[in-house]
Amino acid sequence: MIGAIVGDIVGSRFERHNCKSKEFDFLTPECFFTDDSVMSLALCDALMRVKPDYSDLNENAVESMRRIGRSYPKCGYGRGFYNWMYSDDPQPYGSYGNGAAMRVSGCGYAAKSVGETVLLSKAVTEVTHNHPEGLKGAEATAVAVFLARNGSSVKEIRDYIVKRYYPIDFTLDSIRDGYRFDVTCQNTVPQALEAFFESTGFEDAIRNAISIGGDSDTLAAITGAVAGACYGVPANIREQALTFLDERLRKILLAFEGKFAPTPY
């Protein structure tokens, strides 16, 4: 889980001022958490409060995202999600925005199988992003996290994603110059996953994601979610990232890690 949060925080200062390079200071005082971290942790909160069979996950996802999200009204929500969060009658709104994928990594930790990962991802995503591309982006991310934390190699994860979700037929070098800000799942999730596929470690994966530009905090959150599950997050990076979270968010993260402990490295 901490991998997604690190990616969000590192990418925060580059969202509107892209850095088309891997050479940059990693965590600086200019960094901050955004809606990516808030919503990731809101869904962690929901996953900790559900019945054992997850039959009430939909309603808990709605409640947690609205309750926790309203405590951070200026952290970068898209207009559609913001309106949903404050609506008197919150209903899914057909979105395929990349917000579906940036918040879903907790499902890959809570689930006990790929099949359960798919079900959990759908339950927490369809309450807002019920467009097929939104559902697919979230599912691909959650499944990649599940595979990574359960010992699949980078190649095995790539093969699984390419076969079932996205025909990733590009390299980061081939898209870096032309890639621009894009908030859709279909033009964010494949790029974020490729940043992981080309990585040699956790920090390298985040640097890959930042280096192509675009929606940097969300790209790096998705990449970081999978990379953190695969490589682990170095202790010094973890401790530094935790200082950017407030007490409420740190408490959710630590409780989630305590219940769904990541594989030790």
Image: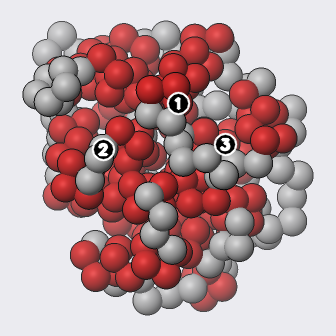
Q: Work out which residue is located at the far front of the displayed protein and give it.
A: 264
47, 100: nearer the viewer: 47
Q: Residues within 10 Å of mark 2 (few under 14, many from 20)?
A: many
SS class, disc 3? helix
Q: Position of residue 46 (x, y in %)?
A: 32, 22
Residue 44: quadrant of the picture = top left
Q: Residue at x 35, y 22 (%)?
A: 48
| Residue drawn at the location 71% of the way across and 73% of the way down | 200
User: As shown in the figure, which amino acid type bears the numbered disc 3?
Assistant: Val
Q: Quadrant of residue 68?
A: top left
Residue 169 coordinates in the image, percent (x, y):
43, 89
- Between marks 2 and 1, how big is the CA–CA gap? 13 Å
Which residue is nearer to you in this view: 15 or 67?
67
Residue to which mark 1 is pinned: 257
Residue 225, placed above or below residue 257: below
Give whichever of discs 2 and 3 has the lower sequence position: 3
Judge whether 111 appears above or below 56 on screen: below
- As drawn, the label of residue 6 is 3
Residue at 51 percent across and 74 percent down: it is 153
* Amino acid on which the number 1 mark rests in the picture: Glu
Mark 2 or 3: the one toward you: 2
| Residue to which mark 2 is pinned | 111
Q: Residue 15, can we see it?
A: no
